[in-house]
Image (spheres, helix red, strand yellow):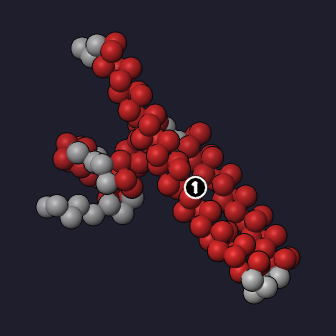
């Protein structure tokens, strides 16, 4: 049986992993918007196009929020590990069917 300490430690590690993954996903969504601001500042993008891209980012950010708030924790942790390259061999074997559905390719086999 898992001790209370180990359980707390595991939850803390999962929380840190999810925070890192959330930051990665959000920054990936922000990068095109950042480039749009640069284009706008250089006069290459009209303001109405910039405001449309801001709106699209806002919608994307809402989707990210929903993914993190409404996806099962175990599934989200597994997805984060996959995207961050931190899956264990045991997880790859145990969840191979799900990982394949997500497009995971084990390059270490």
Residue 32 drawn at (x, y percent): 62, 71
From the viewer's perspective, is residue 3 above or below residue 53? above
101 sits to left or right of 90: right
Q: Quadrant of residue 91?
A: top left
73 sits to left or right of 48: left
Identity of the residue drawn at 27% across and 63% down = 105
Task: Tell me the quadrant of the picture where the N terminus can be found.
Answer: top left
From the viewer's perspective, is residue 1 above or below residue 37? above
Q: Nearer the viewer, residue 64 or 26?
A: 26
Q: Nearer the viewer, residue 15 or 92?
A: 15
Residue that protrudes farthest toward the left in the picture: 109
Identity of the residue drawn at 58% across and 55% down = 26
From the viewer's perspective, is residue 84 above or below residue 88? below
Residue that protrudes farthest toward the right in the picture: 48
71 sits to left or right of 80: right
What is the tally of numbered marks visible in this picture?
A: 1
Q: Residue beneath label 1, please?
A: 26
Q: Nearer the viewer, residue 7 or 95?
A: 7
Note whether residue 53 is visible.
Answer: yes
Identity of the residue drawn at 60% across and 52% down = 64
From the viewer's perspective, is residue 19 above or below residue 33? above
Q: Quadrant of residue 16?
A: top left
Label 1 environment density (alpha carbons within 10 Å; few <14, some 14–19, many ≥20)? some
Residue 102 drawn at (x, y percent): 39, 58
Note whether residue 75 is visible.
Answer: no
Secondary-structure class at tag 1 = helix
Identity of the residue drawn at 14% across and 61% down = 109
Residue 53 drawn at (x, y percent): 74, 70
């Amino acid at each position: 049986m898992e001790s209370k300490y180990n359980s707390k430690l595991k939850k803390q590690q999962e929380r840190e992993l999810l925070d890192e993954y959330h930051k990665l996903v959000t920054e990936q969504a922000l990068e095109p918007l950042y480039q749009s601001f640069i284009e706008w500042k250089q006069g290459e993008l009209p303001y109405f196009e910039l405001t449309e891209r801001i709106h699209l980012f806002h919608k994307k950010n809402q989707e990210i929020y929903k993914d993190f708030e409404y996806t099962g924790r175990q599934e989200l942790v597994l997805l984060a590990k996959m995207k961050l390259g931190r899956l264990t061999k045991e997880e790859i074997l145990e969840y191979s069917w799900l990982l394949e559905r997500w497009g995971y390719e084990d390059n270490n086999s």
